[in-house]
Image (spheres, coloured by chain):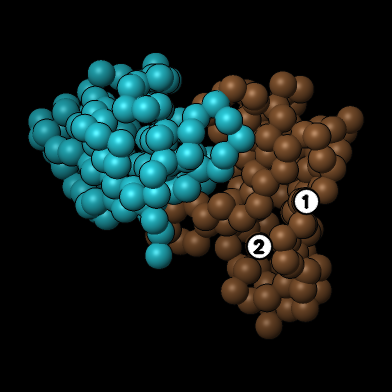
């Protein structure tokens, strides 16, 4: 079992919908991440939160809006997505950012935009 | 441009033999390297890492070798087991960096 929990596992949404992806970890990690993975491609970084503050936004379109309510939770709010945004969205955490500590990933949310 | 490359998309190995997965990188600022294993419908699972001050790190059946001059690392699995069948991703980052750069993955199949 992964120690990073993501919900929902699958999500189908229309282009006008608003939905949220949720991620939770209780390992005391202070850095949390959102990655996006398309089929047969490596994961690509979207956002990094360090000590609950957004530290990296990899030029992600504003239709993706991250939120870190506390050190254990990370959300990704979705609005007006496009079909090309369909992908596996992975949440990860690490003890800290900027130091050599491995990322621990959740099992992802498989998002389909229709 | 892909900064971390895994040139073999797939590898098949007999059970009990050694599996060797290879990875090359282009960015000389990378100093921390990791291997992840991924099963279908699951997220990547951390396997083993190595920092640039070492050239070898071992954990049970898994050993990672780093050749900084060649910008090359490899993962050795010995003996290979059918449960090792998965996609293996190599990843790298630089000091003080938050981003992991992943390779495209190698699908390992261990034949019983």
Q: Which chain hosts label 1?
A: B
Residue A76 visible within the image: no
Residue beneath the point at 76% across and 22% down: B28
In the picture, residue B63 is in which quadrant?
bottom right
Q: Nearer the viewer, residue A93 or A76?
A: A93
Dot in front, 2 or 1 = 1
Residue B53 percent location from the top left of the image: 80, 34
Q: Which label was assigned to residue B57?
A: 1
Residue beneath the point at 31% across and 53% down: A5
Q: State the count of labels.
A: 2
Secondary structure beneath dot 2 equals strand
Q: Are marks 2 and 1 in contact (CB under 8 Å)?
A: no
Name above or below for residue A18 compared with residue B10.
above
Residue lying farthest to the front in this orientation = A28
Are labels 2 and 1 assigned to the same chain? yes
Q: Nearer the viewer, residue B51 or A65?
A: B51
Name above or below for residue B108 compared with residue B29.
below
Using a 10 Å C-alpha cutoff, classify the residue at mark 2 as few (fewer than 14 neighbours), some (14 to 19) or many (20 or more). Answer: many
Residue lying farthest to the right in this orientation = B69
Residue B60 visible within the image: yes
Using a 10 Å C-alpha cutoff, classify the residue at mark 1 as few (fewer than 14 neighbours), some (14 to 19) or many (20 or more). Answer: some
Q: Which residue is mark 2?
A: B108
Secondary structure beneath dot 1 equals strand
Cα separation between marks 2 and 1: 21 Å
Q: Which label was assigned to residue A39?
A: none
Q: Which chain is brown?
A: B
Residue beneath the point at 47% across and 40% down: A94
Q: Nearer the viewer, residue B49 or A43?
A: B49
Q: Nearer the viewer, residue B15 or B77?
A: B77
Q: Which chain hosts label 2?
A: B
In the picture, residue A28 is in which quadrant?
top left
Q: Colour of chain A?
A: cyan
């Amino acid at each position: 079992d992964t120690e990073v929990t993501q919900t929902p596992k699958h999500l189908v949404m229309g282009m006008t919908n608003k939905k949220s992806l949720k991620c939770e970890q209780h390992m005391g990690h202070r850095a949390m991440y959102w990655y996006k993975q398309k089929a047969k491609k490596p994961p690509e970084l979207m956002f990094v939160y360090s000590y609950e503050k957004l530290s990296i936004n990899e030029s992600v379109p504003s239709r993706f809006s991250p939120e870190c309510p506390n050190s254990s939770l990370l959300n990704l709010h979705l609005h007006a997505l496009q079909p090309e945004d369909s992908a596996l969205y992975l949440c990860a955490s690490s003890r800290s950012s900027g130091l050599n500590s491995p990322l621990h990933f959740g099992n992802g949310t498989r998002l389909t935009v229709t | 441009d892909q900064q971390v490359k895994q040139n073999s998309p797939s590898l098949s190995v007999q059970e009990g033999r050694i599996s060797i997965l290879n990875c090359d990188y282009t960015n000389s600022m990378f100093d921390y390297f990791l291997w992840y294993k991924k099963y279908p419908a699951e997220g990547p699972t951390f396997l083993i890492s190595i920092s640039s001050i070492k050239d070898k790190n071992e954990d049970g059946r898994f050993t990672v070798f780093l050749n900084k001059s060649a910008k090359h690392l490899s993962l050795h699995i010995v003996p290979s087991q059918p449960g090792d069948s998965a996609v293996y991703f190599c990843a790298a980052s630089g000091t003080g960096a938050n981003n992991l750069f992943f390779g495209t993955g190698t699908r390992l199949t261990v034949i019983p």
